[in-house]
Image: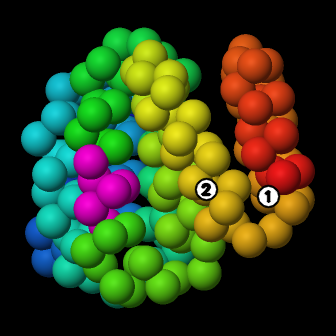
Amino acid sequence: VLHGRVEEANQILENAIENHPDAGLMIQLLQQKIDLGVDAQDDLPKIKNQLLIQKADGSAIWGLRSLVDKIVSNQKLIDLYGLELDSLLKEVAEKNPNYKSYPDFYPLSIYLRGQLLITLRELNLGYEMYSKAAVEYHNASSALALVADLGNKGYPQFALQLLAEIES
């Protein structure tokens, strides 16, 4: 970002967000703060509030997916942000009709919640989210990708259980 001038880039993002609130930019700023080791827990409620009122936006959805990937890869980050991010995904998918009806966002949000919950060691709740996402995607290839994801994350029993559910 701007050849190592991250603080300057963050300031530019903050100014842009102040003038034109946008969840995609807010998520990007949060990720950059996380990369710098800055405590940014106060950012998630602001992002949630923005997502609840704005039109569905592909960059925000991509940002949420990227943010979940970043958080589940680090136990310290999952402890700091996991529950709040799970709540954000649930509320946006349920309360903002623009996102709920955006193609594949609803099942994606459920899958992302499953990743967070499993990483938070809420294994049964996480599995339930994977199972629900498999149904909501309405296609076999997405459901099988969820099976593979569970297996690759070290949960072969859950993967087999999901596979059996899909087949029945």
Instruction: Measuring from the top left, give residue 56's x and y in whole percent.
Output: 41, 81
Q: Are there few (<14), some (14-19), or many (20+) residues within 10 Å of tag 1?
A: some
Q: Secondary structure at mark 2?
A: helix
Question: What is the three-letter code of the residue carrying label 1?
Answer: Ser
In this view, 135 is above or below 6: below
Within the magenta stretch, is there residue 123? no
Q: Residue at x 38, y 68 (%)?
A: 93
User: Disc 1 marks which residue?
Assistant: 142
Placement of 122 over or under 19, stated as above or below: above
The quadrant in which residue 121 appears is top left
Please tell me in which quadrant of the rendered image residue 13 appears. bottom left
| Residue 89 forms part of the magenta stretch | yes
Task: Choose between 3 and 96: the one closer to the eye.
Answer: 96
Tell whether 116 sits left or right of 144. left
Is residue 28 visible to us here? yes
Question: Between disc 1 and disc 2, whose residue precedes?
Answer: 2
Badge 2, how many Cα within 10 Å: few under 14, some, many 20+? many
Give the percent coordinates (x, y) of residue 123: 50, 23
Task: Say how many tags the image has.
Answer: 2
Label annotation for residue 162: none
Question: In the image, residue 161 lies at what x, y percent?
Answer: 76, 32
Residue 101 in the image: x percent, y percent? Answer: 48, 85
- Please state the extent of the stretch shown in magenta in the rendering: 87-92
**Circles 1 and 2: CB distance less than 8 Å?**
yes
Q: Secondary structure at mark 1?
A: helix
Q: Which mark is residue 133?
A: 2
Find the distance from the CA under tag 1 to the CA under tag 2.
9 Å
Determine whether, in the image, residue 96 is placed left or right of residue 70: left
Left-right relation of 156 to 97: right
